[in-house]
Image (tube, helix red, strand yellow):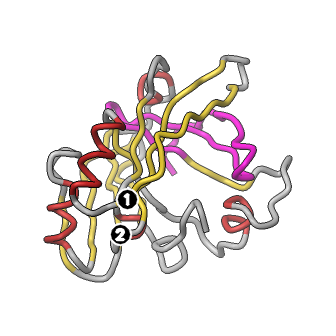
């Protein structure tokens, strides 16, 4: 698709998934797939395995997670975390980071989860360059409420009203590539 091979990242034991990564300059793409070395019954890997086609699922934004959680709470959005995550890379290096997951909101996968990379090198700087993110579009049934919820938490976003949808447009070595949600992935959740 991009003409550049993604680098295998590692496995997420509790989720039944493994990942591979590509850089888009200041951002990156995490490709998540069922891990053939893990049981997949009842976890995210199992739900991915049932998909008929791949697609964009969600997105992530960086931030100071306690501050993000407080801001979300002030906007009546509950969250889980910060949760510490660790995994070992194929080269044996251990990575540790924290995640925050907003929940009980009307925006589905269009609302990002949040990450603090702590002492880890940012994946955009450690993986093969596959292009540059030119555009990221979000469509949600409640665009005005979405903008208010995200105000100050993420850079300006291109948000419109309509059926839930996301699309990333990347200028890659082989030309423009579009990654988008589809009917199966638009409401897919890591937590079921």
- Foreground residue, 192 or 6? 192
In the picture, residue 18 is in which quadrant?
Answer: top right
Question: Mark 2 falls on what kind of element?
Answer: loop
Residue 10 placement (x, y as % from top left)? 69, 35
Residue shown at 13%/71% (left/top)? 144
Nearest to viewer (mark 1 / mark 2): 1
Range of the magenta residues?
A: 1-30
Residue 134 placement (x, y as % from top left)? 25, 48
Q: Is residue 183 magenta?
A: no
Q: Which residue is mark 2?
A: 105
Q: Is residue 26 magenta?
A: yes
In the rendered structure, find residue 78 and report the number of the disc placed on it: 1
- Left or right: 5 as drawn, with respect to 119: right
Residue shown at 50%/29% (left/top)? 128
Residue shown at 64%/33% (left/top)? 9
- Foreground residue, 38 or 64? 64
Q: CA distance from mark 1 to mark 2?
A: 8 Å
- Label 2: how many Cα within 10 Å (few below 14, some 14–19, many 20+): few
Residue 151 placement (x, y as % from top left)? 15, 52
- The vertical placement of 60 against 149, above or below, is above
- The vertical placement of 148 against 25, above or below, is below
In the picture, residue 150 is in which quadrant?
Answer: bottom left
- Label 1: how many Cα within 10 Å (few below 14, some 14–19, many 20+): some
Q: How many marks?
A: 2
Do the residues bearing badges 1 and 2 touch, measured as CB atoms within 8 Å? yes
- Left or right: 104 as drawn, with respect to 7: left
In the rendered structure, find residue 53 and report the number of the disc placed on it: none
Tell me which label, 1 or 2, sits earlier in the chain: 1
- The vertical placement of 95 against 167, above or below, is above
Residue shown at 57%/26% (left/top)? 96
Quarter holding the C terminus is bottom right
Residue 127 placement (x, y as % from top left)? 51, 27
């Amino acid at each position: 698709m991009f003409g550049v091979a993604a680098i295998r990242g590692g496995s997420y034991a509790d989720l039944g998934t493994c990942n591979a990564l590509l850089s888009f300059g200041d951002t990156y793409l995490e490709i998540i797939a069922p891990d053939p070395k893990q049981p997949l019954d009842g976890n995210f890997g199992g739900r991915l395995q049932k998909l008929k086609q791949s697609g964009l699922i969600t997105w992530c934004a960086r931030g100071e997670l306690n501050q993000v959680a407080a801001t979300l709470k002030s906007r009546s959005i509950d969250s889980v975390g910060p949760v510490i995550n660790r995994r070992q890379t194929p080269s044996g290096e251990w990575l540790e980071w924290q995640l925050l997951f907003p929940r009980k909101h009307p925006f589905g996968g269009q609302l990002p989860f949040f990450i603090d990379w702590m002492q880890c090198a940012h994946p955009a700087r450690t993986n093969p360059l596959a292009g540059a993110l030119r555009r990221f579009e979000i469509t949600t049934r409640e665009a005005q409420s979405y903008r208010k919820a995200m105000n100050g938490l993420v850079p300006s976003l291109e948000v419109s009203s309509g059926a839930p949808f996301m699309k990333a447009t990347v200028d890659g070595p082989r030309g423009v590539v579009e990654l988008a949600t589809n009917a199966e992935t638009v409401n897919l959740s890591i937590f079921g």
